[in-house]
Structure formats: structure tokens, C-alpha cells
Image (cartoon, grey):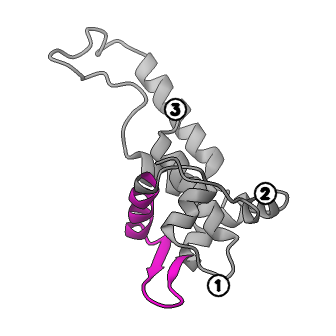
Amino acid sequence: MRLTKFTDLALRAVMRLAVTGTNEPLTTREVAEAMTVPYTHMAKAIARLQHLGVVEARRGRGGGLALTEAGRRTSVGHLVRELEGDGEVVACESGDAPCPLRGACRLRRALRDAQNAFYATLDPLTVDDLVASPAGPVLIGLVGRARD
């Protein structure tokens, strides 16, 4: 299974925020620069993460982005499901006519089972697990320039 670029970007943002100290919140622009992605892309990912309750944004002096406690404990599998949506790996009903194998096809079921196994592998992992050493120190040191 291949994740969308949006999901990949959101996961990287969550990982970067997970290693940020509470006294040093980052802005969306700083996260975008650290991940070397355009600000507009990161802003969309951060907005979705806020909607999911994973990221909190504070305005004003001392403001910035922070990972919520729920965000730290969230299952990576749950997060990926939320970001990717409920779609199946293969779209059997796309286009004007359904697939002619629809009634007898075993591929769709096998792909659904594989997708479920993929998520089940990610379910036990939390965001905190993703940033454990050696990843955490590398994430802290990330500084870059956004591609606008």
C-alpha cells in the first residue's frame, strides 16, 4: 500500500512536533522549513491534524503549534486511517460501469485483507514510539528551507 503525500507530510509534521519542547513551540512555517516542503502544503496538513485533535495551535506571543497529549498517545494506524480515508486499495466501481468480475473476483477481498493487515501493523505504534531514539535527535536537528 502506498500512502498519499498528504499523509506522509502530516506524519512527518506530527513527528517533528513530538520532539519539540513545550517552551519552544514551532510555527507552521518553521515545520514546513524543517521538512523542506511548501508552507501551503504544511498549512493544510496542520489544519487537518488540528481537526483530528492531534495538534493544537496557540496564537499570540508564546504561541505556536503543539502536539496534544492525545496526539502523543494516538495509534499510528488510527492516524493513517483518518488521513487516508475509508477508500479501498482498488476501485471496482469507478467509471461508467462496474468491473465485470465483480461477482466472482477474489482480488478485491485479498486486497482489503492486505490493507487491514497493513493498518494492524501500525496500530500498536504510537507517535511517541516513532520519535524514540535514534529518530528523536535527528528530528530535533532538522532545519531547512521550504520549497515555495
Secondary element type, mark 3: helix
Q: Which span of residues is magenta-colored?
A: 41-66
Q: Which label number is shown at residue 113?
A: 3
Q: Is residue 83 above or below residue 16?
A: above
Which residue is pictured at 40% across the width and 55% down the height? 40
In three-dimensional space, the C-alpha distance between marks 1 and 2, rounded to whole angstroms, equals 19 Å
Q: Report the amino acid beneath label 3.
A: Asp
Which residue is pictured at 70% across the width and 66% down the height? 128
Secondary element type, mark 1: loop
Q: Which residue is mark 1?
A: 22
Q: Residue furthest right?
A: 134
Image spot of residue 92 (x, y percent): 30, 21
| Of callouts 1 and 2, the N-terminal one | 1
Front residue of 118/55: it is 55
Secondary element type, mark 2: helix
Q: Are marks 1 and 3 in contact (CB under 8 Å)?
A: no
Q: Are marks 3 and 2 in contact (CB under 8 Å)?
A: no
> Is 136 part of what is drawn in magenta?
no
Which residue is pictured at 69% across the width and 59% down the height? 143
Q: Which label number is shown at residue 90?
A: none
Is disc 1 surrounded by few (<14), some (14 to 19) or many (20+) residues within 10 Å?
few
In three-dimensional space, the C-alpha distance between marks 3 and 2, rounded to whole angstroms, equals 30 Å
